[in-house]
Amino acid sequence: MAKFKGVDFYNIDSLLTDEERLTRDSVREFIEEKLIPIIEDCYEKARFPMEIVKPLGDLGVLGASLPTEYGCAGLGAVAYGLVIQEIERGDSGIRSFSSVQGSLAMYPIYAFGSEEQKRKWLPAMAKGDKIGCFGLTEPDFGSNPAGMVTRAKRTEKGWLLNGTKAWITNGTIADIAVVWAKTDDGNDTIRGFLVEKGTPGFTAPEIHRKHSLRASVTSELVFSDCEIPEENILPLSKGLKSPLMCLSQARYGISWGAIGSAMACYQTALDYAQGRVQFGKPISAFQLQQAKFADMLTEITKAQLLSFQLGRLKEQGKITPSQISMAKRNNVSMAMEVARKARTILGGNGISGDYPIMRHMNNLESVYTYEGTHDIHTLILGAEITGHQAFE
Amino acid sequence: MKIIVCVKQVPSRDAILRINETSSWIQDRDIAYDVNEPDSYAVEEALKIKEKFGGEVVICSLGPERVQVAIKEGLAKGADRGIHICDPALDNLDALAQARAMAEVIGKEGFDLVFTGLQSDDYGFAQTGVILGELLGVPSATIAMAVEVQDGEKSVRVKRELEAGWFQWYQMPLPASISIQSGLNQPRYATLKGIMNAKKKEIRKVTLSDLSISKDLLVPKQKIERVYFPVKSKKTEIIDGSAKEAAAKLVTKLKQMRAL
């Protein structure tokens, strides 16, 4: 298979710094050599490739945008986005692993943790020696996290945790879970807790029979009179805003990641169409197929520009959550459409594991729903535009 | 050990090449560039030697502004600093003239080893490494498949690739110049921390005015006359006559074509 050379119709590369391009190219090479050769097999067998965690840590992609003093790379937002794009060009499941590790587990420790907590966890997580997960969603509370029923009750030694979290990426393999629970302070204030693997009363059974994100681990987190020592509360966490800040980080990355999936599908379809001959000529010479390519390339290019400017806004500290919603909503939806169009170009071959399209398509069904569903992001934008909140 | 690695930036292998207006070279606008493949192996070999013996790895590249990325890639992988020889007057010269500029800079720097890639993926002359050795007055070895620093860092043993699967071990004193063949090691990835750290590393710029080379020495001895895509042509000739006559005519024709 030819080496992937990127999709860059509008020469967006010329807007990147040397360091951003080097970062993108280094991760691209790594994914090309270490992930793509094994990912289809992992997906088929529903196996998370644990063997790639350390190498990802060595490369520096885990928590890559956090500061160097905690063993991270200290990347800018655009460079970080490009990293995520390249990982998801490999597979959304592996990208989910790294997004959860970096944006949903390391970030809250960094943003709301004590210095001791940061020193204890961040360098080890950056290296891939420790894995983290993030427990916010519950079986009955997805789009409405404020309704959560998981509670942390004060005890003499710390906190007593009870409740269940659902759809938690990395749950079963995590050494540390960042868990959000209502506290009994009279206001039901949501606080973050660090729950270490092996804590009595804490189990993390894996959710099986998934038809999407099969190469990543998805779990429940069950807390049954689980005692958490006082030093494991995230001291600066306060209210639902704290986990939502984490989600903003992760959603930002997802807007880039979706571009990676779309690129993989587009490139696969293009290579196929150039070589597949019907009626005496390559199918890429037929107008109907060309229209699909024109649509796909245009949509990918628009998504790239959206994420690029979003990244620059983030670097300037001017980003808003609704801007992130627009990019997540548009780009994931775009990637799904690209995957579907690309699949049609491959005809029957499009459904085969010999090509990555169906895997990306199935993965994107999850990405469409997690980190704020497409519909919720629509309402966030609706509220931003009109001033009328339509969630409830 | 002080090792200077000369790296060249060449058009990416997947770049769609178009010939320029004067047919003198390819259109170099808007194409992607990569580090020349054997040069990446040279960088890796230098870093491995540094890890074993200590010292310094310096990346040296000649070319326009864009080649800074090639230098930065080496710095991101662990090289200590870079030298960028940057002057429009040096851009379109032959290997000899460019090597003269590089030799002056490298000679002033001082070195134990100079590494180049075996040849560049664009011109493919395979000249710069050996010319550098000659101009610097040090022994050279080409097509290195292994490099072993020996004798308390006084000499180097080089495994050279010959034809037909043969190899040759060759020992020479340091300092020396060695051209590196692809495949002798596994080049590392530039880590993201390495890329960020590279921003702090020095890249010294050298222009023609910093060099004491007379302009006469920079006149190319070699020039590309024309670049063109291979012309596809097909010609069929039916040879008449009996089998015997036709065979005789065929032999005559093949002899005329020097195919026999």
Image (cartoon, rainbow, N blue to C red):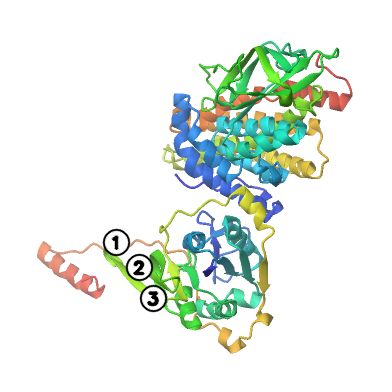
Q: Earlier in the sequence, mark 2 or mark 3?
A: 2
Instruction: State the mark number for residue B81.
Output: none
Q: Chain of mark 2?
A: B
Apparent side of residue A250 relative to residue B59 in the rendered image (left or right): right
Say which label, 1 or 2, has the lower sequence index.
2
Which residue matches tag 2? Answer: B160
Quarter-of-image position of residue A315:
top right
Residue B172: assigned label: 3
Give the Cα separation between the discs numbered 2 and 3.
12 Å
Q: Chain of mark 3?
A: B
Circle 1 residues within 10 Å: few <14, some 14–19, many ≥20: few
Image quadrant of residue A198? top right
Q: CA distance from mark 1 to mark 2?
A: 45 Å
Residue B236's disc is 1
Helix, strand or loop at label 1? It is: loop
Residue name at image x 50 percent, y 43 percent: A32
- Left/right of residue A190 with respect to residue A199 in the rendered view: right
